[in-house]
Amino acid sequence: MKVSLWGGDTSQLGDPAPKASYAGVLRVEPVSTSFQQAISGILVTLAGYAIALPVIAWLVLGATWVLRGRPGTFVEYRTDALRFEYLEGMFASHLAIGSVIILTMFVVRYVHHIHPRWLCSVQPGFRWRYAVICGLIAIVGLNGVYWISNLGHPPIWNPDQDFVWWALVILLTAPLQAAGEEFLFRGYLLQAAGAVGRSPWLAVAISAAVFTALHGTQNLPLMVDRFGFGLLAGALVVVTGGLEAAVAVHAVNNVFAFGYAAAAGGIAQARTVEVSTWATTGWNLLSYCLVALVAWFVGRRMRVATRTPGLDSGRALR
């Protein structure tokens, strides 16, 4: 008997169908079973998301409120912290969102009865070497386009006195937050949508729409920006067979977005941004497209798996 870290006998876990795309990993026959599992899994995920995020944030901020000597009421402190007026607010928020990784793996394991490694990629598992390379591509591509778009506008250097601590929290937790969102939107929701429909591109569109909607109030250019990112990240997941490139690009984007904001002394404004311009959206989408194309090209050169193994690979279906 093989026992996994997630508990239970892993020999009872099924494998995806052979030669399935990433979007088809959770699809089983009959279709009614896929539908029931997908609906159940989405409900469990949304319930867990709604419960875990505020609870984790409450626990972390409760502890830091006491350590700070109880400044004001806890409700006022928590509100200000989650606006990133205190650096522990970013820590608590990002830790809470990062916990979604565990939540989505739990749902894949116990609702769909598939090993959680298939949520990472069709190889299966998380392909760290490819992720690191995509991160380097994103650092060059996203920042290159950003600096070109801001020629003639020198960067603002007006950091708070706690800038070093902000930078440390950003480096440690922004990648975790980005990974949590990718495992939820481009990971589980994309696979759940793909388990019901036959088109991976419809699943990509659905996950991008939900990703955009859950970002709250936003004007049209910002909505297009986020929806475009969701589409490109989802497409990248499908054509590379895993979450690695999307996680890396999202993590780099968030680290530098928060980093530039912290350097300018506007971290709280970056947290609550609701308005963008068409020019900014255009430059952002250009950078996303360029990075996605290079990441896809590198994935092809590395021959990353884009389909689950066939029956002749030695992996038997159970």
Image (tube, rainbow, N blue to C red):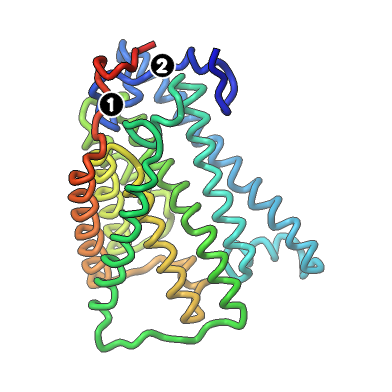
Q: Is residue 85 left or right of residue 114?
A: right
- For marks 1 and 2 on the same chain, the one whose residue lies earlier in the sequence: 2
Up-down relation of residue 244 to residue 283 (above or below)? above
Tell me the kind of residue under disc 1: Thr
Camera-nearest residue between 179 and 317:
317
Q: Residue at x 37, y 62 (%)?
A: 253
Where is residue 74 shown, x and y percent of the image? 74, 61
Please tell me whether mark 1 sits on a helix, a strand or a loop: loop
Tell me the kind of residue under disc 2: Gly
Q: Is residue 22 left or right of residue 297?
A: right
Which image quadrant: the C terminus?
top left
Q: Are marks 1 and 2 in contact (CB under 8 Å)?
A: no
Q: Residues within 10 Å of mark 2 (few under 14, many from 20)?
A: some
Please tell me whether mark 2 sits on a helix, a strand or a loop: loop
Up-down relation of residue 285 to residue 148 (above or below)? above
Which image quadrant: the N terminus?
top right
Residue 187 picture quarter: top left
Camera-nearest residue between 98 and 293:
293
Where is residue 19 shown, x and y percent of the image? 23, 23
Q: Which residue is mark 2?
A: 14
Camera-nearest residue between 257 and 73:
257
Q: Residue at x 77, y 68 (%)?
A: 68
Residue 50 picture quarter: top right
Q: Which residue is mark 1?
A: 308
Where is residue 30 shown, x and y percent of the image? 31, 11
Q: Is residue 245 left or right of residue 74?
A: left
Alpha carbon of mark 1 to alpha carbon of mark 2: how far?
13 Å
Up-down relation of residue 119 to residue 112 (above or below)? below
Q: Residues within 10 Å of mark 1 (few under 14, many from 20)?
A: many
Residue 144 picture quarter: bottom left
